[in-house]
């Protein structure tokens, strides 16, 4: 049968006529609910994660005051605005595993504001008394965080623009919007909303707090003091593998589920969210939807560390060497026996010994689950997605394990191989001589250093924003990386890999 366009009016018919397993929202939306969450950065991950948890609260637990108003700040967000507006802000989450696919229409995003259309509307929305939480998935670069000094990049032209009081009604950065809205709430005698970072960074909440307070101090110390005293910035570990949507995903949705959706999301069945239970203006009962609310900030940090070092670190181990070897998807790399062993042995022998024990978490089970998730052939997770913006990832996912292994003289050969593979990757040429796109804000600098260094890491390691002195000055590390870079340059990834695995 012909697919039905995803709209409020078609929901009942979509549910009745779909061939596959389809769930649709039956809760009230639009004017019947309050938008308690304003979310900045509506991409695939937000739509597969926070919006799904909120959808469950609305569908199964009668929550009506925490629907989401999505916000886009970047010019490219116009595409999301148009997609969502054309279908009453509904979209489909397609969960895929070996057991099959489930299509789940999500209705928790109730409206969408595109800041370049009307910046004042975004500030007013955040300042509205119904808003209790402003959540963020703005990627590392959205935080204007200097990795080296751990301070706000206050000299950045965007931050400078937003710090000018003349621009308070037309900010460009997330901090400009948050500040302007919080200043209004302060004036109106409201609580500050909770700023809830859902970005995949260690100490995401603490960094958000530090950046916003620094910004506010430069604008108005009184507001900064109020935010410091009354604000809440929970730290969180977020997890759900969410590939980029492909045209084939849209076609499959139309053919199997008879749904015409201009921008569905494909994801895995697994999802996890561990968040510090610290909110300044109330929160919904997130725990009813399976969120792990944790009182102790250290516990959250430990979950974050496990996830970033094991899941994202392994993704790096799959991504850079995998792309050099000519693979396209994560599951293809995992199906290669030597790569499969490499990932497992790196987790078990090099990363696991550095991680804290978390009560109630069986780390070996966690690693096994990761191997299964990475091997899921149905989600078609793209290596270029994993390799995107590596300069914001490797320093978080791989280098801290190396630095700690140096400290305790632990094993780190495989981690060094991954670093070496990235150093080779930045040149944008794979082992068979094919060129590929290196998508990284630091691409030019990385490529210049890689060219100057050849098969030595010394030039790249001079980039102070990315690498600490502990790495630059460690002979054992330099030796391992140099050997790996020479081997990869001479023999390619697949011939070098066996040196790093045992049977
Ligand atoms: C990936 C993550 O982009 C990446 O580097 O490792 O997007 C990963 O899929 C998510 O963190 C999973 O929660």
Image (spheres, helix red, strand yellow):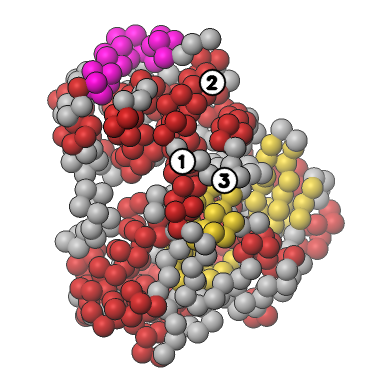
Q: Secondary structure at mark 3?
A: loop
In whole angstroms, how far apart are the C-alphas of marks 2 and 1? 25 Å
Q: Which residue shows up at 52% across the image and 24% down it? A: 344
Q: Which residue shows up at 41% across the image and 14% down it? A: 500
Q: Residue furthest right?
A: 16
Residue span colored magenta: 476-500
Foreground disc of the pair 2, 3: 3
Mark 2 lies within 8 Å of ligand 1 (Cβ measured): no
Residue 348 visible from this viewpoint: yes
Spot occupied by residue 38 in the image (x, y as percentages of width and height): 50, 70
Structural crowding at the residue carrying mark 2, measured as other residues with C-alpha within 10 Å and reported as few (<14), some (14–19) or many (≥20):
some
Q: Which residue shows up at 37% across the image and 86% down it? A: 186
Residue carrying label 1: 356
- Give the mark count: 3
Q: Secondary structure at mark 2?
A: helix
Residue carrying label 3: 359
Magenta span main SS: helix
Describe residue 487's horizontal placement relative to residue 473 as left or right.
Answer: right
Residue 255 in the image: above or below residue 382: below
Residue carrying label 2: 340
């Amino acid at each position: 049968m012909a697919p039905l366009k995803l709209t409020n009016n078609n929901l009942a018919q979509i549910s009745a006529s779909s061939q596959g397993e389809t769930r649709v929202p039956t809760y009230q939306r639009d004017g019947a609910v309050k938008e308690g969450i304003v979310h900045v950065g509506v991409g695939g991950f937000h739509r597969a994660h926070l919006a799904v948890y909120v959808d469950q609260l609305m569908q199964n637990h009668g929550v009506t005051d925490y629907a989401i108003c999505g916000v886009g700040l970047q010019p490219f967000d116009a595409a999301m605005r148009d997609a969502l507006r054309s279908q009453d802000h509904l979209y489909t989450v397609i969960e895929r595993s070996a057991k099959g696919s489930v299509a789940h229409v999500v209705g928790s995003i109730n409206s969408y504001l595109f800041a370049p259309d009307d910046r004042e509307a975004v500030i007013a929305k955040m300042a509205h008394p119904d808003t209790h939480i402003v959540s963020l998935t703005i990627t590392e670069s959205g935080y204007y965080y200097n990795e080296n000094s751990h301070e706000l990049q206050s000299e950045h032209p965007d931050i400078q623009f937003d710090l000018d009081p003349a621009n308070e009604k037309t900010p460009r950065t997330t901090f400009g919007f948050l500040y302007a809205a919080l200043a209004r709430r302060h004036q109106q005698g409201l609580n500050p909303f909770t700023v809830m970072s859902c970005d995949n960074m260690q100490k995401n909440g603490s960094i958000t707090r530090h950046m916003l307070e620094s910004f506010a101090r430069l604008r108005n110390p009184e507001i900064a003091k109020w935010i410091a005293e009354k604000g809440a910035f929970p730290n969180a570990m977020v997890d759900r593998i969410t590939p980029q949507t492909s045209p084939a995903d849209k076609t499959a949705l139309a053919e199997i589920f008879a749904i015409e959706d201009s921008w569905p999301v494909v994801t895995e069945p697994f999802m996890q969210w561990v968040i510090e239970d610290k909110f300044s203006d109330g929160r919904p009962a997130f725990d009813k939807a399976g969120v792990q609310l944790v009182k102790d900030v250290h516990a959250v940090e430990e979950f974050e560390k496990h996830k970033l070092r094991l899941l994202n670190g392994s993704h790096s181990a799959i991504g850079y060497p995998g792309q050099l070897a000519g693979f396209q998807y994560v599951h293809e790399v995992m199906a290669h026996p030597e790569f499969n062993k490499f990932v497992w042995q790196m987790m078990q022998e090099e990363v696991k010994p550095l991680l804290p024990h978390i009560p109630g978490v069986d780390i070996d089970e966690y690693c096994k689950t990761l191997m299964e998730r990475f091997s899921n052939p149905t989600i078609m997770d793209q290596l270029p997605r994993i390799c995107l913006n590596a300069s914001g990832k490797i320093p978080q996912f791989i280098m801290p394990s190396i630095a700690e292994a140096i400290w305790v003289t632990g094993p780190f050969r495989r981690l060094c191989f991954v670093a070496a593979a990235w150093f080779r990757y930045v040149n944008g040429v794979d082992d068979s001589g094919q060129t590929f796109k290196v998508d990284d804000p630091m691409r030019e600098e990385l490529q210049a250093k890689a060219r100057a260094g050849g098969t030595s890491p010394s030039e790249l390691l001079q980039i102070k924003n990315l690498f600490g002195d502990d790495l630059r000055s460690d002979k054992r590390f330099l030796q391992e990386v140099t050997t790996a870079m020479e081997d990869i340059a001479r023999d390619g990834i697949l011939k070098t890999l066996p040196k790093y695995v045992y049977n």
